[in-house]
Amino acid sequence: MNSQALLNNRYRIDETLGKGGMAVVYRGRDLMLERDVAIKVLREDFSVDPNFRERFREEAKAAANLSHPNIVTVYDFGYDDNHLYIVMEFILGKDLNTIITERGRLRIEDGISLAIQASAGIGFAHRSDLVHCDVKPHNFIVTPDLRLKVTDFGIARVLSSINPEEEADVVWGSPQYFSPEQAAGGPPSPASDVYSLGVVLYQMFTGQLPFIGKTSGELAKMHRRAQPIRPTELNPLIPPELEEVILKVLSKEPSQRYRTADQLGRVLQTIAARLKAENTPPKGAPARRPAPAPAAGPTRVSPSAPTLGRPPSPVRQPVSASQPVRSGTAPSKPVSAADTSFIEIDWLAVGLGLMAFVAVSGLVPFWFWVYTVMFPPR
């Protein structure tokens, strides 16, 4: 659509934010409420299909009922000029896929925080009997202060309308992120979203996808049968318990994963709390002081010592009396307390003591004289 175009004489199209296989997302302006919005306009060939329009209307209504801090709010949806559109909250930030592409992989603390927020948003949808069906980093908007919101519930389907025995004609989700049951054409479930979250976790912490294929069919086969490389082989900084969580949610069988995103989020919160406790010094402990800078001049490094950074200080082992002394070194002379201590003499105290002694000594003749006067000898 052209810039400055109007939808239903209310929503002005300003600029293109992104394009996908099903829709184009624009930044727009709600002229009635005078606020910026994000407008997702579906492809025209989808919009002209009456069955698709009805399904989209039901899904948009379900998404509009979701109100959560980690979910992009849906304001409105409609049909105009042969185009279906949905109006959403505009978030200033980047999608998670762009962030991963820029950084390669995320810090453990940042990645866990984002995963907890994504699990909270998707878990809230699960409690509302709604499956996202297309969980991927492209649908996670991250603000500059690392707050995450899940978007694009337009493909989600209401759980109560899903027949567990049905086989879908359309594979829901993106091939890089969909679950084994979605790859087989089966109906999605909350456990399917959990699997897709596991793919996102893997990508955040390793910088790459667990499965890479040239075609959608090849990816589908890998999701159903192949096992991913252990994440710690690609990033040794990943804690072991976090690696086990990632591998658990990437299980082929839905029953072996966490049932909902809420359960995954609670496990991640436990891991985050433990990591924070390990990195926080005990209350009242003295702050760590930076090590003093080394003295100027060349530093000798043994051939076996590491060459990166400062060389490690040699560790001195205690030498017992029966332990032979290595050639070329002299035994250390035993040091007594007298050699290492200094006796400090308080001369004021000594002087006062002498004066007291003299005074007492002078009183002896005086008392002898008093005695002889009072009791003269006969």
Image (cartoon, helix red, strand yellow):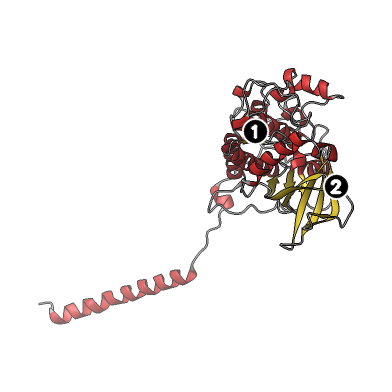
Q: In screen coordinates, is 152 left or right of 44?
A: left
Q: CA distance from mark 1 to mark 2?
A: 43 Å
Residue at point 74% right, 50% down?
Answer: 87
x and y percentages locating residue 154 in the rendered image: 72, 40
Within the image, what quadrant is residue 205 found in?
Answer: top right
In the displayed orientation, state which residue is furthest to the bottom: 373
The nearer-to-camera label among 1 and 2 is 1
Q: Residues within 10 Å of mark 2 (few under 14, many from 20)?
A: few
Q: In screen coordinates, is 122 left or right of 378?
A: right
Residue at point 80% right, 55% down?
Answer: 28
Q: In screen coordinates, is 283 left or right of 211?
A: left
Nearer the observer, 294 or 269: 269
Within the image, what quadrant is residue 309 found in?
Answer: top right
Check the picture and name the quadrant holding the C terminus.
bottom left
Which tag, 1 or 2, sits closer to the chain's start? 1
One can see residue 3 in this view: yes
In the displayed orientation, state which residue is furthest to the left: 378
Nearer the observer, 231 or 375: 231
One can see residue 334 in this view: no
Tell me the amino acid under the disc marked 1. Leu
x and y percentages locating residue 329 in the rendered image: 73, 35
| Residue that badge 1 annotates | 242
Tell me the amino acid under the disc marked 2. Pro
x and y percentages locating residue 319 in the rendered image: 62, 33
Disc sitting over residue 298 in the figure: 2
Q: Secondary structure at mark 2?
A: loop
In the displayed orientation, state which residue is furthest to the front: 50
